Image (spheres, helix red, strand yellow):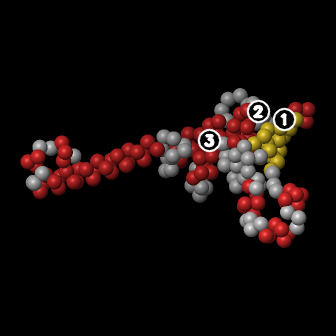
Amino acid sequence: MSDYLPKYYEDIREVNAIIKAESEAFEQFNEDAADVLAQFYIDTATWGLAFWEWLCGIPVNESKPINQRRELLRSKLRGIGTVTVGMIKNVAESYANGEVEIIEDSPNYTITVKFVGKLGVPANLADIQQALRDIIPAHLIVGFEFTYVTYNQLREKYVNYDALKASGLTYAELLIT
């Protein structure tokens, strides 16, 4: 700010103190404005998630991790409109477990959501189930399938347990390989 003042103000102590105080206030104002702006977007909102949840009709649960609250909001917003296989897939993929396949069995009134993006059961499966139950018509049965590393898959790569142990891979690394 001092760059905008005439040079003869540089040596005046009171002017420098005023400029310092005002620059700190402007800096704080800019940080606060950026924080408020961040609340307008689900991906960056923190304290504003409660407003988003209220807007979407979701009970506020601040004990949940922020990323799970964001996933629930995204799925709620994606689940507006006519229910199609694409919409169900879009809602299910808004959660952290990633990619899914939707398997329709029309004669038996069944829809199966198969998680293929990551192995195992998603951490917030109850939220995913509720979000899908909210949008899928009541006459349809919704099933869930999960992918895991099976014993036979391990046997294909490793002859026995000693070979598996010798690889030095952790359980998490085995899931990716």
Would residue 66 be visible to someone looking at this image? Answer: yes
User: Does 117 sit left or right of 3 as displayed?
Assistant: right
- x 82%, y 56%: residue: 149
What secondary structure is found at the residue carrying circle 1? strand
- x 38%, y 48%: residue: 32
Task: Tell me, yes or no, whether the two marked residues, 3 and 1, touch with CB atoms within 8 Å.
Answer: no
Please state which amino acid type lies under the numbered disc 2: Val
Quarter of the image that includes the C terminus:
bottom right
Mark linked to residue 37 = none
At which x and y percent is residue 96? 66, 49
CA–CA distance between discs 3 and 1?
24 Å
Q: Earlier in the sequence, mark 3 or mark 1?
A: 3
What secondary structure is found at the residue carrying circle 2? helix
Q: Please rate how many residues cluster around mark 1, counting C-alpha atoms within 10 Å: few if below 14, some from 14 to 19, many from 20.
A: some
User: Does 138 sit left or right of 59 as displayed?
Assistant: right
Vertical position of residue 106 compared to residue 23: above or below? above
Vertical position of residue 85 compared to residue 94: above or below? above
Please state which amino acid type lies under the numbered disc 3: Arg
- Can you identify the residue that label 1 sits on? 104
What secondary structure is found at the residue carrying circle 3? helix
CA–CA distance between discs 3 and 2?
17 Å
- Can you identify the residue that label 3 sits on? 74
At which x and y percent is residue 20? 22, 54
Task: Tell me, yes or no, whether the two marked residues, 2 and 1, touch with CB atoms within 8 Å.
Answer: yes
At which x and y percent is residue 70? 59, 47
| Residue at the left extreme, as displayed | 8
> 50 or 165, which is in the foreground?
165
- x 12%, y 57%: residue: 13
Q: Quadrant of residue 104?
A: top right
